Amino acid sequence: MNVTTTSRYPWENDPLLTVENLTMRFGGLVAVDNLSFTVGRGDITALIGPNGAGKTTVFNCVTGFYKPTEGRIVMRHGPGRRDEAVEELTDSAARYARQEDGAVFLLERMPDFTISSTAKVARTFQNIRLFGGMTCLENLLVAQHNPLMRASGFSIAGLLNLPSYRSAAKEAKDRAIYWLEQCQLIHRADDPAADLPYGDQRRLEIARAMCSEPHLLCLDEPAAGLNPRESAELNALLQFIRSETGTSILLIEHDMGVVMKISDHVVVLDYGRKIADETADAVRNDPKVIAAYLGVDDESEIDDEDIRADLHRGEHQAGTQGGEA
Ligand SMILES: Nc1ncnc2c1ncn2[C@@H]1O[C@H](COP(=O)(O)OP(=O)(O)OP(=O)(O)O)[C@@H](O)[C@H]1O
């Protein structure tokens, strides 16, 4: 049975991911300090903060690259909070539990490859990690290696080219072509990934992640190094992904033009701690956020036009986003 609660924020009523009291220490350094936040189902949630605030460390914990020092990271398939199922799972030794209409996962217990294949969390990296010598199409087919291996019966059906394998292989290719089209890269399908301009490589990484049909897409600075036209194309692509596939997006981004235009919800970190957790509108006017970006301790001393202007980039368009209360 799902417990229904009504919260001030829509993302708390239908959470896809909850990060609960997450702490990550590296020796004496506390990179993430007792952090809790929620990613709403179908939302674009941004994680922002100054350099070294702990954003990538949070991604690495969510995607299983790091095992958190403390804390719980819950992923839910299917609607609702599923509080009872989450507590039962926590009390057991299991990593995940399936229900009739969904499943709950404790990501801190799962190895990284099952977080992507079973919990359906995909990610891109701050530094592009494509197979440069493979074509764009091949990069997208490699991303679907797991379902293809299953369909091949781990060799026999594939070797004999049985109908079940042929149909899985066709589906994988169709999916790859679909995402190349959506990312405006279909004309580069047979070119080596390394030959693509930087902005195209960033979109190819997103296409590759989408081929695994994730419920949650984690993007680490997808707008880094993009020119204004490419940033606008990225905004359109992320909004398309949300509206057409329902995939939720968790975004680390320094480009406030991207963050403020498309985010339903913004979480702000500073020195590993959460200092704001609000709609984009509320965050851009928050003195604590402006102070963190300026690196000043006394909020009353803030009067920096550049930071204010940066946080207000995209304000007009943000007002049109449905998720922003
Ligand atoms: N593997 C590691 N070992 C030791 N310290 C680490 C490790 N990974 C991150 N850190 C430290 O943790 C802190 C947070 O780093 P993190 O990369 O998460 O910040 P960030 O907010 O993503 O920064 P940026 O915006 O510059 O990418 C930093 O002080 C960093 O040096």
Image: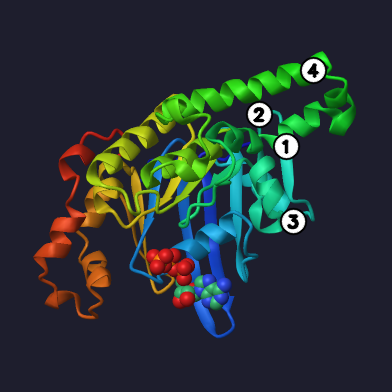
Quarter of the image where one finds residue 55: bottom left
Circle on res. 91:
3
Q: Amino acid at mark 3?
A: Asp
Give the number of the mark in front: 2 or 4. Answer: 4
Circle on res. 101:
2
Residue at the image point whose x is 29% and y is 33% from the top: 322
Residue 3 lies, with reference to residue 112, above or below; the image says above
Q: Are marks 4 and 1 in contact (CB under 8 Å)?
A: no
Kindly state the secondary structure of the residue where label 1 is placed.
helix
Residue 166 lies, with reference to residue 297, above or below; the image says above
CA separation, marks 4 and 1? 15 Å
Q: Residue 236 or 298: which is nearer the viewer?
A: 236
Q: Position of residue 170 (x, y in %)?
A: 67, 19
Give the number of the mark in front: 3 or 2. Answer: 2
Of labels 2 and 4, earlier in sequence is: 2
Q: Position of residue 165 (x, y in %)?
A: 78, 21
Q: Amino acid at mark 1?
A: Asn
Q: Amino acid at mark 2?
A: Asp
Q: Position of residue 241 (x, y in %)?
A: 43, 31
Q: Residue furthest top?
A: 163
Of labels 3 and 4, earlier in sequence is: 3
Kindly state the secondary structure of the residue where label 2 is placed.
loop
Of labels 4 and 1, earlier in sequence is: 1
Of labels 2 and 1, earlier in sequence is: 2
Quarter of the image where one finds residue 20: bottom right
CA separation, marks 3 and 1? 30 Å
Mark 1, Cα crowd under 10 Å, few <14 / some 14-19 / many 20+, is few
Kindly state the secondary structure of the residue where label 4 is placed.
helix
Specify the quadrant that holds the N terminus. top right
